[in-house]
């Protein structure tokens, strides 16, 4: 079983097989040693959160079972109001997954064959997959080595090199590992070319850039409630954020088979892409503790940064940005040996992402920014992520830090 429960698998059969395991046991067992009787270290400890939520979340789910409005029940609208408020935008539209949120926005903007959309290659598959699924052409752009997010200069050169048969329609920026991308620079670039900027905030809901919360960055944004994301449900879910009431109306229609004024009028093609009421109920409970969890995640990140300085390259935050640390991702030139040694010590790690999307079969026809994606290639060969969740105890984290340092010092 993989601990890589965050990036997930493109194969739905595999997902169906592994998903139950992932919720129950995202851990790797540690070989026993005489002085060490601790439980296996979790990469993401959903069980600890479950214990903390206690009976509140059980009661919330029971309320849904009792009222029986499983589809678009009252909790869905309540959640959407809370999400919009938190993001500081007028409208939040919940949906069945982050992937659906991306696809719904591309459908709403009529993105299709002949259209080009920029996105990073160093991201989870869904970002580019949504573009390709619509028949449009992903144009892969390099990322910056400091924040792992889209490099506005690479984006500008990709736009300049776009072949004449393609029309640039938009840019999808990803807030990788929880830190917002460079929205000031990317918004200016999008505006200069008269296209939209979509924020793929699947990993960053709860983070900020200056005075702006994630959800309000870009022209519109999406997030994901996949269980291992910072704000995760007990199943799949997602949301779209926008200021635009007309766009909201189109998305609400797409969410339910392109429905018009009543449910038997279909004015466009759509999907079954609603968020289950029971997931909305779970998320409402999780939102109650989300701010404290973000503080705890930042405490864990600070402890890593202090303990690992000089051993591996620790992640950098831009001065005006905060992160929700969906992952704590470090870099090492000896990544594979280090990961193997940590595994032997019972320290689970994961690699996001070992294979950039532009090197994967479904994107053979996609375009790549001029000069290729050297930073992306370098990151794919050197990054790995350490256990990160709000319930990581200091002594367990100190053990992880101590093991990383020991292996780095002995090189
Ligand atoms: C998880 C993720 C998605 C997709 O979200 P799902 O809810 O799993 O469909 C999209 N983009 C990024 C960057 C992600 O990490």
Image (spheres, rainbow, N blue to C red):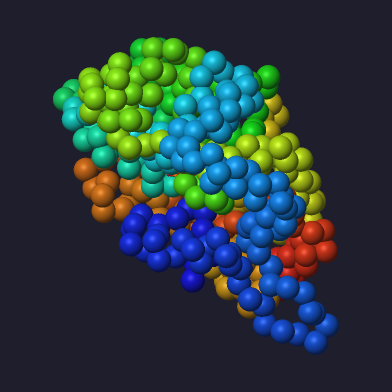
- 19 left or right, relative to 209: left
399 or 331, nearer to the observer: 399
381 or 172, nearer to the observer: 172
Residue plotted at (62% across, 27% down): 82
Q: Is residue 302 visible?
A: no
Q: Identify the residue at the far bottom of this view.
A: 34
- Vertical comparison of 34 with 308: above or below: below
Residue plotted at (21% across, 43% down): 365
In terms of image quadrants, where is residue 32?
Answer: bottom right
Q: Identify the residue at the far front of this view.
A: 66
Q: Is residue 355 visible?
A: yes
Residue plotted at (47% across, 47% down): 236
42 or 47, nearer to the observer: 47
Task: Point out residue 204 in the picture as x, y percentages from the top left corner.
Answer: 58, 37
Task: Point out residue 2 in the picture as x, y percentages from the top left corner.
Answer: 50, 67
Residue plotted at (55% across, 44% down): 66
Task: Point out residue 254 in the picture as x, y percentages from the top left corner.
Answer: 32, 27
Q: Identify the residue at the far left of this view.
A: 165
Q: How many marks?
A: 0
Task: Point out residue 386 in the picture as x, y percentages from the top left corner.
Answer: 64, 58
In terms of image quadrants, where is residue 195?
Answer: top left
Q: Where is the C terminus found, in terms of image quarters? A: bottom right
- 201 left or right, relative to 316: left
- Vertical comparison of 63 with 72: above or below: below
């Amino acid at each position: 079983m993989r601990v890589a429960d965050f990036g997930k698998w493109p194969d739905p059969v595999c997902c169906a097989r592994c998903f139950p395991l992932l919720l129950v046991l995202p851990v790797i067992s540690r070989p026993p040693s005489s002085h060490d009787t601790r439980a296996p270290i979790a990469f993401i400890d959903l069980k600890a959160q479950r214990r903390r939520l206690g009976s509140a979340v059980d009661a919330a789910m029971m309320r849904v079972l009792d009222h029986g409005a499983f589809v678009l029940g009252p909790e869905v609208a309540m959640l959407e109001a809370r999400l919009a408020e938190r993001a500081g935008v007028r409208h939040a539209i919940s949906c069945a997954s982050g992937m659906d949120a991306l696809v719904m926005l591309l459908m709403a903007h009529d993105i299709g064959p002949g259209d080009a959309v920029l996105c990073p290659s160093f991201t989870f598959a869904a970002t580019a997959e949504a573009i390709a699924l619509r028949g449009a052409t992903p144009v892969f752009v390099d990322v910056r080595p400091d924040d792992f997010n889209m490099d506005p200069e690479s984006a500008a050169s990709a736009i300049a090199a776009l072949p004449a048969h393609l029309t640039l329609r938009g840019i999808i920026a990803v807030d990788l590992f929880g830190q917002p991308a460079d929205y000031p620079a990317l918004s200016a670039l999008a505006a200069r070319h008269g296209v939209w900027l979509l924020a793929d905030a699947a990993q960053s809901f709860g983070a900020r850039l200056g005075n702006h919360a994630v959800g309000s960055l870009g022209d519109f944004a999406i997030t994901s409630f996949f269980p291992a994301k910072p704000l995760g449900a007990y199943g799949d879910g997602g949301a779209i954020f926008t200021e635009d009431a007309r766009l909201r109306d189109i998305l609400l229609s797409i969410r339910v088979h392109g429905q018009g004024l009543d449910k038997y009028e279909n004015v466009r093609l759509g999907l079954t892409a609603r968020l289950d009421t029971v997931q909305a109920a779970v998320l409402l409970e999780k939102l109650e503790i989300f701010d404290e969890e973000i503080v705890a995640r930042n405490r864990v990140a600070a402890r890593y940064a202090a303990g690992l300085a000089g051993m591996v390259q620790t992640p950098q935050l831009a001065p005006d940005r905060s992160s929700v640390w969906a992952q704590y991702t470090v870099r090492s030139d000896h990544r594979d040996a280090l990961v193997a040694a940590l595994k032997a010590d019972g320290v689970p790690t994961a690699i996001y992402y070992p294979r950039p999307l532009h090197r994967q079969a479904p994107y053979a026809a996609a375009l790549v920014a001029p000069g290729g994606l050297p930073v992306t290639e370098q990151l794919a060969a050197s990054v790995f992520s350490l256990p990160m969740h709000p319930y990581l105890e200091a002594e367990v984290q100190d053990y992880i830090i101590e093991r990383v340092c020991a292996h780095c010092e002995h090189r």
